[in-house]
Image: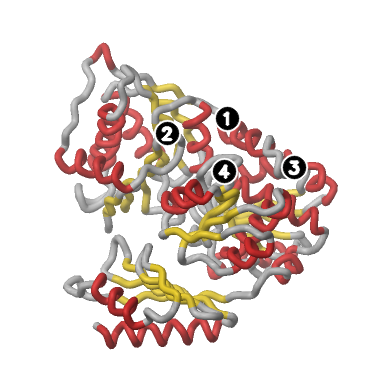
């Protein structure tokens, strides 16, 4: 069992020993550290924090612990209950709150949970802020409020629908075109809060919705990460129901995967590519951003629309930073994470759904035909397990020198761009491993490149 403390929050498995798992004491300590950080950097006499949770089994317990801890610090809590990550992000802004905490372990299995931390803009905290919170937690520098200064606990219902209404206000989308297309869609919400959000959104769009695993009870029927190997049931159901496509979200609804009408995967890397193609077309070009481990296809599409593509280090907060820096009109990550600043600076599957359906309606072609319009790249994702005594940074530096005559990016590990393919090597933040991502014009070539790089790294070690 595991407890992982990082700059963006704390995540771990439920039960077990304090400091080794996500126990009630660990949840309280980290919530208290976050609350103290907010109080230290604010001149306000009374702060407000929005909290929400996905449907996993431990969510109610962890959510109550977080809420009561913040109240004990004298902070008012606005509790959305069952929610999505992007819903909480939007609520922080709409409620003029000072921060937010999302109780979710995202795509991790049901035994995991986490506290994800937001600033007053509804965006994930940055590295320096995360470090300060970790230090407060480590030193237990907590001062709780006296009885007359305790915070309040206000439970707010219906915020997912409020989020949906905000999404439907976006000028970029074409609701009429979606309604006229009369789409038939299968959805898999892995028995979490996407089971509340997606049917409600699709109903408002006039889309026929066939629900698979949409009861938000936290009992995930399959591995909740929306990858091809976990989505065999929805792939079959799309074909059997003669649906136009399928949508799959992870438990906190910030990753969107798409299934074509023939049951094949549209590809998690291509969710962002298709949405960006639509946005760039509607706005007559613009800049885009994805992380270094995302497909080259986004760059190709951006250049086609006469825009500028930039890459960032892996991690949503890094993508957002680069998007602001380059004034990007859309960005995200190749795991199905769409960030559209016209809505907010956070990955949002609901925004992804309306952008994709608008695009498909305008093109008036099948989902499979749309995928075939895009550059056909294939990715391989591998890793090398190392002993803790090996200096991973030194290994990556040697690879940088070895390939210094190629196009090399060292923002996050080492990315080497060749003419028709690339490889990205980066160390894990939580394990003694090197992650190796490759992309090429065929899966065989992507695997061959990965194998070649793995052998070179082992030789250097």
Earlier sequence position, callout 3 versus callout 2: 2
- The correct choice, above or below, for 21 with respect to 36 in the image is below
- The correct choice, above or below, for 18 with respect to 302 in the image is above
Estimate the spatial distance between the alpha carbons at disc 3 and disc 4, rounded to whole Å: 22 Å
Q: Quadrant of residue 103?
A: top left
Closer mark to the observer between disc 1 and disc 3: 3
Q: Quadrant of the C terminus?
A: bottom left
The outermost residue toward the left is 139
Estimate the spatial distance between the alpha carbons at disc 4 and disc 1, rounded to whole Å: 23 Å
Estimate the spatial distance between the alpha carbons at disc 3 and disc 2, rounded to whole Å: 28 Å
Earlier sequence position, callout 4 versus callout 1: 1
Earlier sequence position, callout 1 versus callout 2: 2
Estimate the x, y position of residue 325 in percent, counting from the top left. 47, 48
Closer mark to the observer between disc 3 and disc 4: 4
Closer mark to the observer between disc 4 and disc 1: 4
Earlier sequence position, callout 2 versus callout 4: 2
Closer mark to the observer between disc 1 and disc 2: 2
Estimate the x, y position of residue 399 in percent, counting from the top left. 33, 79
| Callouts 2 and 4 close, C-beta under 8 Å | no
- The correct choice, above or below, for 456 with respect to 51 in the image is below
Query: Is residue 118 visible to the viewer in this orientation of the structure?
Result: yes
Earlier sequence position, callout 3 versus callout 4: 3
Look at mark 4 in the image and give the residue it sits on: 341
Look at mark 1 in the image and give the residue it sits on: 158
Look at mark 3 in the image and give the residue it sits on: 205
- The correct choice, above or below, for 148 with respect to 330 in the image is above
Q: What element carries label 3?
A: loop
Estimate the x, y position of residue 401 in percent, counting from the top left. 32, 79
Look at mark 2 in the image and give the residue it sits on: 51
Estimate the spatial distance between the alpha carbons at disc 1 and disc 2, rounded to whole Å: 14 Å
Query: Is residue 239 visible to the viewer in this orientation of the structure?
Result: no
């Amino acid at each position: 069992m595991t407890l992982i403390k990082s700059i963006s929050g704390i995540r771990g498995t439920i039960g077990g020993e304090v400091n080794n798992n996500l126990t009630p004491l660990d949840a309280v300590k980290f919530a208290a550290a976050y609350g103290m950080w907010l109080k230290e950097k604010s001149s306000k006499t009374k702060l407000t924090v929005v909290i929400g949770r996905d449907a996993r089994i431990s969510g109610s317990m962890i959510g109550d612990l977080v809420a009561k801890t913040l109240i004990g610090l004298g902070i008012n809590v606005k509790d959305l209950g069952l929610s999505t990550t992007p819903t909480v992000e939007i609520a922080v802004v709409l409620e003029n709150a000072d921060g937010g905490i999302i109780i979710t372990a995202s795509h991790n299995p049901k035994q995991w949970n986490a506290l994800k931390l937001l600033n007053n803009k509804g965006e994930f905290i940055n590295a320096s802020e995360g470090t300060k919170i970790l230090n407060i937690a480590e030193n237990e520098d907590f001062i709780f409020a006296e009885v007359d200064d305790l915070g309040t606990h206000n439970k707010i219902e219906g915020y997912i629908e409020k989020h949906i209404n905000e999404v439907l206000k976006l000028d970029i989308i074409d609701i009429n075109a979606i309604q006229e297309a009369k789409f038939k869609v299968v959805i898999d919400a892995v028995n979490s809060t996407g089971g509340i959000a997606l049917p409600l959104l699709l109903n408002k769009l006039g889309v026929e919705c066939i629900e698979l695993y949409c009861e938000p009870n936290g009992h995930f029927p399959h591995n909740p990460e929306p990858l091809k190997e976990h989505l065999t049931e929805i792939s079959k159901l799309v074909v059997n129901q003669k649906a136009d496509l399928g949508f799959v979200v992870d438990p906190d609804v910030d990753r969107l995967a798409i299934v074509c009408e023939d049951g094949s995967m549209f590809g998690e890397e291509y969710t962002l590519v298709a949405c960006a193609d639509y946005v760039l077309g509607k706005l007559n070009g613009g800049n885009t951003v994805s992380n270094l481990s995302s497909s080259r296809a986004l760059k190709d599409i951006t250049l086609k629309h006469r825009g500028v593509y930039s890459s960032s280090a892996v991690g949503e907060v890094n993508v957002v930073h680069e998007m602001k820096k380059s004034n990007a009109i859309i960005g995200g990550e190749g795991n199905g994470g769409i960030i559209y600043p016209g809505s907010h600076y956070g990955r949002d599957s609901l925004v992804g759904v309306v952008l994709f359906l608008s695009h498909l309606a305008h093109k008036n072609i099948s989902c499979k035909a749309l995928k075939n319009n895009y550059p056909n790249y294939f990715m391989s994702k591998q890793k090398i397990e190392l002993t803790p005594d090996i200096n991973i940074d030194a290994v990556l530096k040697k690879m940088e020198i070895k390939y210094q005559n190629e196009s090399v990016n060292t923002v996050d590990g080492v990315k080497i761009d060749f003419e028709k393919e690339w490889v990205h090597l980066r160390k894990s933040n939580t394990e003694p491993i090197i992650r190796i991502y490759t992309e090429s014009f065929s899966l065989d070539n992507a695997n061959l490149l990965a194998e070649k790089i793995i052998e070179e790294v082992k030789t250097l070690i």
